[in-house]
Image (cartoon, rainbow, N blue to C red):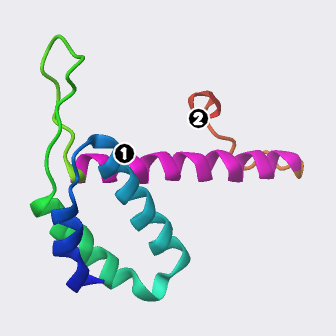
Amino acid sequence: MLHHLPRLLRVGIFSENVLRGIIFLLFEKAIREPRYCPMYAQVCHRLSQDAPTFEDPHKAEPGAPKTFLRLLLLKCQDEFDKRLRASHLAAGACGSDVGTPPPSLLT
């Protein structure tokens, strides 16, 4: 896969949505194929260096640019929160109140 990375970058990461799609695919592949996590980590490292940065054109004030690393971190945080909520909901369905999440996690 690493030898295809330059081709991926040449094809064009021309929008934030394309970059988010690549992050989604890498994340899902890494979860489903832990054996290849070192390779996916190398791909992420390379993309963190070479992927373009996107600004939000609809913001009146300049905000934090959307870099590969920022978007990857947001994806990881979202997945963590989803899985935490799911585990707490499953524990609640079993009648367990151990580890009840704070109300902010349930919204």
Badge 1 amino acid? Leu
Instruction: Give the prevailing secondary structure in the magenta stretch.
Output: helix
Query: Looking at the picture, does residue 59 appear above or below residue 12?
Result: above
- What percent of the width, then of the height, locates residue 23? 36, 58
Q: Nearer the viewer, residue 6 or 37?
A: 6
Q: Mark 1 — residue?
A: 74
Disc 2 marks which residue? 105
> For the residue marked with disc 2, what is the amino acid?
Leu
Callout 2 crowding tier (Cα within 10 Å): few <14, some 14–19, many ≥20: few
Q: Secondary structure at mark 1?
A: helix
Which image quadrant for residue 53?
Answer: top left
29 or 81: nearer the viewer = 29
Q: Quadrant of residue 12?
A: bottom left
The quarter of the image holding the C terminus is top right
**Considering the numbered disc 2 on the image, is that residue within a helix, a strand or a loop?**
helix
Instruction: Point out the residue furthest to the front here.
Output: 11
